[in-house]
Image: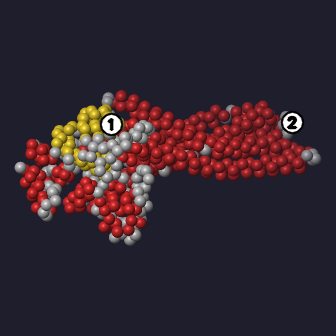
Amino acid sequence: MSPPDAQDAGAERAASVAGTADRALVAAARHSAGRTAAVLGCTLGAAAAALAEPAVLGHTLDLLLRGAPAGPTWTLLCAAVIAAEVALDAAAARLTGDVDGRSTGRLRRLGLARLLRAAPHHAARHAPGETAARLTAHATEAGKVPAAAAHAVAALLPPLGAVTALFLIDLWTALAFLVGVPFLVLLLRAFARDTHASIARYQQVQLETAGRLTEALAGARTIAAAGTVERERGRVLARLPELGTEGRRMWQVYGGTTARSAALMPMLLYAVLAVGGVRLAAGAIGVGELLAAVRYAGLAAGIGAVTGGLAAVVRGRSAARRTAALLTLPALAHGRAQLPQDGPGTLELRDVRVVRGAATVLHDISLVIPGGTTVAVVGRSGAGKTLFAAVAGRLTDPDAGRVLLDGVPLQELTAEALRRDVGYAFDRPVLLGDTVGGAIAFGAGRGPGPDAVRAAARAAGADAFVRRLPHGYGTALADAPMSGGEVQRLGLARAFCHAGRLLVLDDATSSLDTVTAREVERALAREIRPGTRIVVAHRLSSAARADLVVWLEDGRVRATGTHRELWRADPAYRAVFGADADEGTEPDTGRGTERDTGRDTEREAAR
């Protein structure tokens, strides 16, 4: 892509994110429409009371100066107007907190739902720290927009109403105020422009710093072992000065606007007071009207309230664009189809192609895997094995071609049908749930019972160490320190507990010792629900045990066949396993000791 094209694409993405952010804010406002309307009503009521106060106060003063009988009544009316303003302001503040919380929660749910519905490689576009910042701090700031917009709208009422009141009191006094209005408008415009640019830069630096911090926390042991603590601290904090600069710039913009308004407002008030004094001396207005005119001039020049509301909206919209970056992630759409009852698990890939960036990672793969077959996917690092496994179980969609399970395209299945019958186990599983037993039972559909959980743990070689934990399967995950191999066994147990007609094991035994790995392979063949297995294999033993081997090279299927056929036919296949091939490490066939078994199988493979 040429630089101009790249710039156009970047502008289009930015425009798309901005539009998505605005739509998300509208949706959040609708989610709390009643409360937002109540905020607007209370703020408008308070503004109306503030607007009525100078007129009522001025008229009351004139009545009291004349000794009119209605003076005490108007005094009570003044108190009522002031009390109404205070009460409505308090109610608006209470409702604002409620609207902010509901809107923030809505934005977070939208962002998290889209993040979880996206294919993992799309979700991985954003570093974990950045994602956390988008869903926490930025969503909180964005959630303030609906109420802030209501306050900003209400903040316009006193200045506009005050200008109207000035005209009703005295034309010349109003004209004296209007001389300064263009300066107020220019001040607001400059404030909005400068604040938006500064906030956008601040939030971007904040995101990048959060991402670096999360990376450092995740790699704390590696950093300590490498002795690079100071270097990492410098890397994480490298942009802290820039963050400080942008933060100070935001306050400078706000402070500069406040300072200029503080200089402009007294000048306007003095101008109104001077003209009003002349008009009072001429008998055109009374003392109460002069007091009201001065108060209305103060309301009309009340740029602080308008500026504060505008700043909150600008900050919130900028933050919403950060959160909305998650909303633009493409989701994995699902259909309405179901799998045929008692299907064997036949998997078919038809001309499957996967592109990442500008590179084709899987090239037009066509393959039929019979139901009930155990398939080992082998190849050197970077051959496309993990991506093949992701496409096979629809963790991602191919850019071309189709994947079918028992004749049904995976894209046409409902989400429930897909995850009920297609399971995964990974090399570095993440355990979710409150307890160890809950982590094994975690999955779609009805939760398995305690007996099923224990059976799956036994099949994965995890039951023995789980029973040694303080509360067995009821031990809280936080109180169960485990090695990488033990975590991997629990990940396998979770997959076994929910095994459907297709089970994908993506290097899921890499952290297990050889003996345990072979025990797991035996259990998978004998104790887990029968079905099709796709095993991303690095061990020679896994390939040798499989019914079929799919040999990938540079994203293409170089060959398929049994392990023995490929082993005999092509030295390059043997080279895939490196040291294992040299040492003759093969699975046992049920005869002899571990060492004897390896030698026997190697001799068989070499014949």
Q: Kindly identify which numbered label has been placed on residue 407.
A: 1
Q: Kindly identify which numbered label has been placed on residue 21.
A: none
**One can see residue 303 in this view:** no
- Measuring from the top left, give residue 506's x and y in whole percent: 28, 49
Does residue 448 appear to the left or right of 582 in the view shown? right
Which quadrant holds residue 285?
A: top right
Label 2 amino acid?
Gly
Say how many tags the image has: 2
- Measuring from the top left, give residue 544's x and y in whole percent: 17, 51
Residue at 65% in and 52% down:
94
Residue at 67% in and 38% down:
156
- Measuring from the top left, give residue 302's x and y in whole percent: 67, 42
Given this view, does label 1 or label 2 mark the residue nearer the observer? 1
Q: Front-most of 503 and 64?
A: 503
- Measuring from the top left, give residue 95's x and y in whole percent: 65, 49
Q: Front-most of 124 and 581?
A: 581
Q: Residues within 10 Å of mark 1 (few under 14, many from 20)?
A: some
Label 1 amino acid?
Gly
Is 485 drawn above or below residue 17 in the view shown?
below
Task: Find numbered disc 2 in the image and state the secondary structure of the residue it sits on.
Answer: loop
Residue at 36% in and 31% down:
6
Which quadrant holds residue 3?
A: top left
Residue at 37% in and 43% down:
341
Q: Residues within 10 Å of mark 2 (few under 14, many from 20)?
A: few
Q: Front-most of 291 and 229?
A: 229
In the rendered image, the quadrant that contains the N terminus is: top left
**One can see residue 516 in this view:** yes
Task: Write down the residue under mark 2.
Answer: 283
Q: Residue furthest left?
A: 607
Q: CA distance from mark 1 to mark 2?
A: 95 Å
Q: Front-most of 273 and 302?
A: 302
